[in-house]
Amino acid sequence: MLKKVLTVNHLTKKYKDRLAVNDVSFSIYEGEIFGLLGPNGAGKTSIIKMITGLSEITSGDVTICDISIKKNFEKAIRNVGAIVETPTMYQYMSGKQNLKYYASLYKGIPKTRIDEVAELVGLKDRIKDKVKTYSLGMKQRLGIAQAILHNPKILILDEPTNGLDPNGIIEIRNFLKNIARKEKISILVSSHILSEMEALCDTVAIIDFGKLKQIKTVANLSKDLKVKPKIAIKVNYPNFVGKLIMNQFKFHCEVAGQNVICDMEEKDIPKVTSYLISKNVPIFGIASVSKSLEQIFMDVVNNKQN
Ligand SMILES: Nc1ncnc2c1ncn2[C@@H]1O[C@H](COP(=O)(O)OP(=O)(O)O)[C@@H](O)[C@H]1O
Ligand SMILES: [Mg+2]
């Protein structure tokens, strides 16, 4: 059976009267990449700050490798590597000097580990260069190297791809997956971008207004994506045509620009088009539109889907 590395139990955070995290519970298993997904202000950073001891827990608890952070924070947190705010780096020192410095803060990190982590995050060739010459993506990777120096069981990253260009995002994604596999480490990562979470995570928890709305494996997210595409029909008077179709066939229709988006299946196309032609409605195009991941996400957030 898979081991739980981190469990969040009825976690709640109140800032004065504002409930920022509302009774959130989930578990992360060994080797799992777990994503917290939610719009800005959803409570992701607040959850991560409580887990990493940067912010006091209002109620609930967090256990890391079966140790409660409330009971024994020092021992529990030894299993965690985290980047929550921008990690401190000495710009005029090389990447390697920075890593050496951080290694000296822990007991028992072997010298070989520094080269090992540099290689893991793909900085081997540049590790002797000064940090000030690094791109944002490279600094981010050095931060992660720093965070995993002490062989933690779980790596926690708050919005690690913020500010990165598309290439940087792909780079980070690839080597996080690599690290999870090679180091057998679990990863907790947050983001407000669904497509990013889908590409990186095994499991995604959707957070909105401090509440956990849903936990899904990414395989299931993709399955939802394939559920029920809609049919878009391009016409001159979409409002009018939408009403025609609703009256005749009872399919729900929405208007998007020149298109009527109908809640119907491909097999319904012939009868609907025949009907429209019989009503002298010119048709300029017909296409099947899949629900985008962003839409699924919005549906979940707006409680349209459970
Ligand atoms: N230190 C704080 N004091 C008061 N309110 C805060 C503080 N930090 C965050 N909040 C509020 O808590 C809610 C959740 O914020 P946050 O955890 O930063 O969300 P996210 O990381 O998902 O964007 C927001 O409404 C935010 O304004
Ligand atoms: Mg945040």
Image (tube, grey):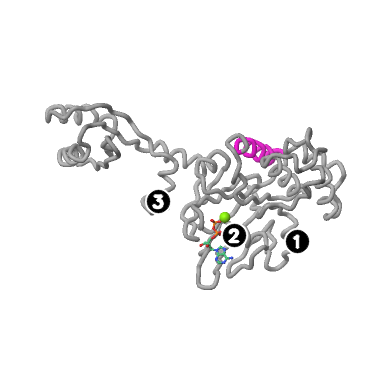
3D distance between C-alphas at marks 1 and 2? 17 Å
- The residue under label 3 is which amino acid type? Asn
Give the image quadrant in which the ligand numbered 2 is located.
bottom right
Quarter occupied by residue 254: top left
Mark 3 within 8 Å of ligand 1, using the beta carbon: no
Question: Does the segment drawn in magenta span residue 181?
Answer: yes
Highlighted magenta segment, given as a residue range: 169-182
Viewer-side residue, 247 vs 241:
241
Query: Where is residue 142 shown, x and y percent of the image?
Result: 73, 43
Quarter occupied by residue 196: top right
Within-10-Å neighbours for mark 1: few <14, some 14–19, many 20+: some
Q: Pointer 3 and pointer 1: residues touching (CB < 8 Å)?
A: no
- Residue with the mark numbered 3: 306
Q: Earlier in the sequence, mark 1 or mark 2?
A: 2
Looking at the image, the residue that sits furthest to the left is 279
Q: Is residue 81 above or below residue 58?
A: above
Within-10-Å neighbours for mark 2: few <14, some 14–19, many 20+: many
Query: Where is residue 53 shown, x and y percent of the image?
Result: 67, 63
- Residue with the mark numbered 2: 8
